[in-house]
Image (spheres, rainbow, N blue to C red):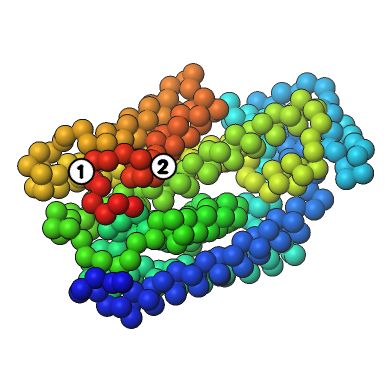
Amino acid sequence: MLAAGTNENLAHTSNVLIYSAMAVYMLAFFAHIFEWIFGSRSKVARTAAALTPGGSRAEAQGNAKDAGTVTIKVATKGGGTTVLERPKIITRSASGSRDVPDGPGADGGDVQGDMWGRIALSLTVLAFIIAAGGVLTRALSVQRAPWGNMYEFSITFSTVAVGVYLGLLASRKLNIRWLGLPLVTTVLLTLGLAVTVLYTASDQLVPALHSYWLWIHVSTAIFCGAVFYVGAVSTLLYLFRDRYETKLIAGEKISAFATSVLERLPAAATLDKLAYRVNAAVFPLWTFTIIAGAIWAGSAWGHYWEWDPKETWSFITWVAYACYLHARATAGWKGRKAATLALIAFACFLFNYYGVNIFVTGKHSYAGV
């Protein structure tokens, strides 16, 4: 039953739009699967090409290191092993990263894979528009910001995350087509959890939340979380891709499945650079988010900081990301070590949202979940 002051029709419309968006996201999920399946065939030697002489490209690399040959073992479906012998020419940038090409998933893949990719992207855009409509009608149903509880935060966060992805694609400065599948998968899980476990009927807020700081503080937290998510996925995939490239160079046996998946990704160095750039870019805004929350706390509670669980874990998240950024500027903490710090920092962000809200009681516990 809806509370007084709530527009029942708009609240119902919001629910219908969110479920509709989930249905379209599901279609986009399958389209992305087909993109990876059809776009991943016969790509075994793509990364291996980075280990072979490449004409003008090889001549342009003054720091190439010739060390014999590389044996590339790729498991076949029949249980056998395909062995490729390649001259070992490994080029490295000034930072020490391997110079290998991005996989086809970085720019859409072959013709058939690209067709499914375009379908998946179109469906993702459609689902984003529908979900944005669900968030907007939820806000209009109670005439307030649509992030007063975990359900509203979840539907808004997932929509903003997709918006960040589409914005980066539209800018053409960062080619992140490969992010579509993990993003849509995460959005489906987030929305599924929101409508089944976290759902809260549209209602008015408690007096303490009636402030313009709700728009400023929480909106920046949502945006930061969406960008941190992009950084976390890039970091996680970097670890897998880096391990894959290491095995390739060492001539170790690699399964056909791992090859088909990891060859769709950008090079490890590209993923590492993207993760660092997005985390570094949004870190100042996360700092502002904490400061804005402290200012709001001062006006609402009379104290700027009381070590409330939400405040504490926001600060812990800030410290974790600060350590990551500092580690990237330190010679001995690049690559996998720094990536581990980045994942720990994002885990702190997730616990700050789910763990603190569900398992810990504090001054931020206004509406249960």
Q: Is residue 334 visible?
A: no
Q: Is residue 150 above or below residue 11?
A: above
Between 91 and 319, the one nearer to me in the picture: 319
Would residue 360 be found to the left or right of residue 53 on screen? left
Q: Residue at x 46, y 46 (%)?
A: 229
Q: Is residue 13 above or below residue 105?
A: below
Left or right, 95 with reference to 244: left
**Marks 1 and 2, the one that precedes in the sequence:** 2
Q: Amino acid at mark 1?
A: Lys
Residue 41 percent location from the top left of the image: 80, 53
Q: SS for tag 2?
A: helix
Horizontal relation, residue 149 to residue 24: left or right: left
Can residue 301 be spotted in the picture? yes
Q: Cα distance, mark 1 to mark 2?
A: 19 Å
Residue at the extreme front: 1
Q: Residues within 10 Å of mark 1 (few under 14, many from 20)?
A: few
Please state the horizontal and vertical placement of residue 141, each as a whole percent of the image.
Answer: 28, 74
Rendering quarter of residue 285: top left
Q: Which residue is mark 1?
A: 363
| Outermost residue, top side | 332
In the rendered structure, find residue 350 and report the number of the disc placed on it: 2
Q: What residue is rendered at 78% in x and 48% in y? A: 43
Mark toward the viewer: 1 or 2: 1
Q: Where is residue 209, by image quadrant? A: bottom left
Contact between labelled residues 2 and 1, with CB atoms less than 8 Å apart? no
| Residue 40, position as x, y percentages in the image | 75, 52
The foreground one among 354 and 171 is: 354
Q: How many marks?
A: 2
Identified at 74% across, 56% down, the residue is 37
Q: Which residue is depicted at the point 66% across and 52% down?
A: 105
Report which quarter residue 93 is drawn in.
top right
